[in-house]
Image: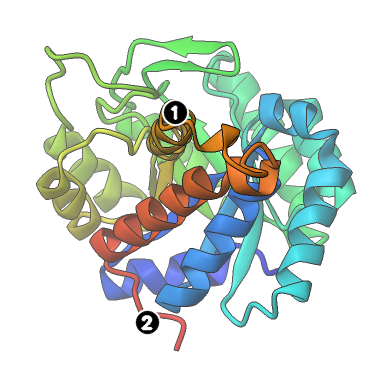
Amino acid sequence: MLVNAKEMLDKAYENGYAIGHFNTNNLEWTKAILNAAEEKKTAVIIAGSEGAIKYMGGFRVVADLVKAMHDEMGITVPVAIHLDHGSYEGAKKAIEAGFTSVMFDGSHFPLEENLEKTKEIVELAHSKGISVEAEVGGIGGEEDGVTSAGELADVEECKKLASLGIDFLAAGIGNIHGVYPADWQGLNFERLQEISDAVKMPIVLHGGTGIPDDQIKKAISLGVSKINVNTECQLVFAEATRKYIEAGKDQQGKGFDPRKLLADGTQAIVDKVEEKIEMFGSTNSAK
């Protein structure tokens, strides 16, 4: 049975570690994340962006895939299926389709509209036992067409959003999606501390790929309890798959069989997810 993300994140927040949120893009990705979490004995959040969900065949397909695979594989650790950067309509569809956690990203709306829509999603989700993440202050880079320069979230706006009964808060602290540019300034820990003191709830760090380990660990010590990783898994998957083809393995025997063709890439995701779990400090937290 899948769970919502509130309990696992509250536990992480209280005990000073972070739970990994790993985006899935297909069946291999889902299986790799589940395998890694079970191996490391940690709760995990499997997330889909609206773009990936569309690619995979729709909200219900993704929810059913994660549930069925979780059950068939005999997974014993808590797993949440989460909508990443959901639109207002997308969040409603995810709730309807059986997701156990949703993010409504209203950060590009004027504040009042963000608050109004977030409040409505909170009421709808909570009536069905589903956890809610909301965002204030854009995260840099681009995610499914929502672009932002990585501004810092306003502390007062964070407080207003937190007061609506959300379960965890995504707030911009200089982080960006995708690969970080060479001139990136790093995370703003002063602002993170102010936000953390103001909201007293688990904070979400988006754009986890490419942030130095020491900054990640410091962010966790200041209240970050959920860290989102996507690009890094895509990069190692592509690299391992490219090496397999460049070595000509797809032309040996039945090396073209997708089960063989994608095996090295899938294993690379498992290894990357396990490495992240170790760094986030959540290994054995589900025992």
Q: Which residue is mark 1?
A: 242
231 and 164: which is toward the camera = 231
Q: Position of residue 75 (x, y in %)?
A: 64, 77
In the rendered image, which quarter is residue 222 located in? bottom left
Q: Position of residue 129 (x, y in %)?
A: 75, 64
107 w.r.t. 48: above or below: above
At horizontal 57% and vertical 34% (from top left) the residue drawn is 250
- Label 1: state its secondary structure: helix
The residue at the point 70 percent across, 48 percent down is: 27
Residue 275 appears left or right of 204: left
> Is residue 80 depicted above or below 227 in this figure?
below
Instruction: Please state which of the two labelled residues, at mark 1 or mark 2, is closer to the viewer.
Output: 1
For mark 2, what is the residue? 284
**Residue 94, x across and y down, in percent:** 80, 42
For residue 132, say whether it is visible: no
In the drawing, does residue 4 fall left or right of residue 167? right
Q: Residue at position x 34%, y 70% from top?
A: 282
Which amino acid does the dot numbered 2 rest on? Answer: Asn
| Disc 2 residue crowd, few under 14, some 14–19, many 20+, Cα 10 Å | some
How crowded is the residue under tag 1: few (<14 C-alpha within 10 Å), some, or many (20+)? some
Residue found farthest to the bottom: 287
In the image, 271 versus 7, the foreground residue is: 271
User: Considering the numbered disc 2 on the image, is that residue within a helix, a strand or a loop?
Assistant: loop
**Given the current orientation, which residue lies at the most extreme front position?**
253
Q: Which scheme is used to colour this image of the protein?
A: rainbow
Q: Earlier in the sequence, mark 1 or mark 2?
A: 1
Q: CA distance from mark 1 to mark 2?
A: 33 Å
Side (left or right) of 265 relative to 284: right
| Image vertical order of residue 39 relative to residue 84, above or below | below
Q: In this view of the protein, which residue sits in the foreground, 198 or 262?
A: 262
Q: Residue 33, percent across and down? A: 54, 57
- Residue type beneath disc 1: Arg
